[in-house]
Amino acid sequence: MKIIRIQNEDYPKKLKNIDNPPKQLYVLGNEKILDNFGLAIIGCRQYSEYGKKVAKDISFKLAKQGINIISGMARGIDGFAHMGCMVAGGKTVAVLGSGFNNIYPKENIELLKEIIRTGGTIITEYSPDTKPIATNFPLRNRIISGLSDGVIVVEARKKSGTLITVDYALEQGKEIFAVPRKHK
């Protein structure tokens, strides 16, 4: 684990330009990719098979073009976005809402290991023992949008953390793209 403070030369330039930038980041993996061009792919935890396929396909195709994929390593669309990117041989950045000693959700510990193994990065502003409490995740979302050059939303619900990320992205002047739910 590496700690990068805001005054350090290797602190991500994109994050220095957001409101309330994290004072420091805890980093596992390849921190050199944090300033590369990247798109966030975010969405709901209760996904459809269509949403799963779209998240994987979009991230795969973008990664094949050399675009980093940024997401929150959450259950559902976030995890599929990370997976699609790695299958394409791309680099992905996962932003956690907890410390490294409390990975959430637990079922994504293997995903975390794979992200690091494939040259990606895991970051958090939370110290290693920080638990995944609900108030951490909305704050985490400003980092997801802050690192991105645009945000792709796949199947968001009306009241969700996804829309918090969209609000941050709009405040930060980012482009927003949406993939609606497939109607039956």
Image (tube, grey):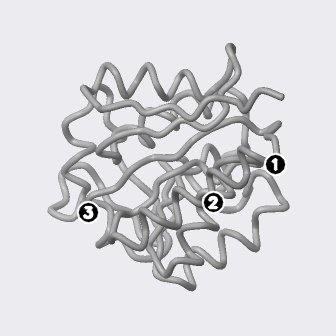
Could you tell me residue 130's position as x and y percent? Answer: 66, 47
* In this rendering, position of residue 114 left or right of residue 32: right
Q: Earlier in the sequence, mark 1 or mark 3?
A: 3
For the residue labelled by badge 2, is the local secondary structure a helix, a strand or a loop?
A: helix
Q: Which mark is residue 142?
A: none
Question: For the view shown, which residue lies furthest in the top direction?
Answer: 158
Q: Neighbour class for label 3 at 10 Å: few (<14), some, many (≥20)?
A: some
Label 1 – label 2 distance at C-alpha: 11 Å
| Identity, as a three-letter code, of the amino acid under mark 1 | Glu
Which residue is the site of mark 1? 49
- Tags 2 and 3 touching, CB below 8 Å: no
Q: Is residue 63 above or below residue 178?
A: below
Q: Is residue 4 above or below residue 24?
A: below
Quarter residue 11 falls in:
bottom left
| Identity, as a three-letter code, of the amino acid under mark 2 | Lys
Question: For the view shown, which residue lies furthest in the bottom direction?
Answer: 117
Quarter residue 94 falls in:
bottom right
| Identity, as a three-letter code, of the amino acid under mark 3 | Asn
Which residue is the site of mark 3? 36
Residue in the picture at 60% in, 67% down:
84
Residue in the picture at 46% in, 81% down:
119
- Relative to the observer, which residue lies in front, 57 or 133? 57
Eye-nearest disc, 1 or 3: 1
Which residue is the site of mark 2? 56
For the residue labelled by badge 3, is the local secondary structure a helix, a strand or a loop?
A: loop
